[in-house]
Image (cartoon, grey):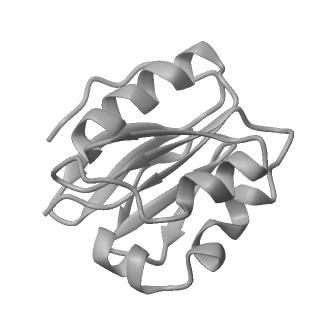
Amino acid sequence: MQLVPATGKGRPLITAYGAGGFRFGLETGDVRLEGSVLILADTPSAWGPLTMADLMAGNLADHVAPILALTGEIEFLLLGTGPDLVPPPSGLRDLLKGAGIGLELMATPAACRTYNHLATEGRHFAVAMLPVT
């Protein structure tokens, strides 16, 4: 799915998603990342779990450690759960709440659009998104 590019106040914007990955508009040109992505501040990077089942089956604390390291710097985590909205893994909300980080949960297509909108506002948040095939 193509998204309309906009200015992201220094953050890379998602210009497309689907086929198992994401495309970001960077100053140096578009970059595609395959699989899940984690966006901390202005840097998109690969993220381990590919599905909610992977996220629930693995060590949840390890998956969210980079996000928890931003305690005091971000307001919330925007989590894209893949093609459909599904409940968060047990304990995720508690881990984040203990660090003073909120959780916004939505299907990945909605999370991509929301991310771009929030990035243009200059909000302080992290993003973890599972891919849509």
In the current view of this chain or complex, which residue is farthest to the right?
Answer: 72
Q: Report the residue at 64% width, 79% height from top.
A: 62
Q: Is residue 66 left or right of residue 6?
A: right
Residue 71 pos. (x, y %):
82, 48
Q: Is residue 133 left or right of residue 91?
A: left
Image quadrant for the N terminus?
Answer: top left
Residue 23, placed above or below residue 121: below
The residue closer to the viewer here, 40 or 59, is 59
Is residue 51 visible to us here? no
Q: Report the residue at 32% width, 28% height from top.
A: 113
Q: Report the residue at 42% width, 74% height from top.
A: 55
Question: Which image quarter: residue 101?
Answer: top right
Residue 68 pos. (x, y %):
75, 58
Residue 17 pos. (x, y %):
24, 49
Q: Is residue 77 left or right of residue 116?
A: right
Residue 33 pos. (x, y %):
39, 64
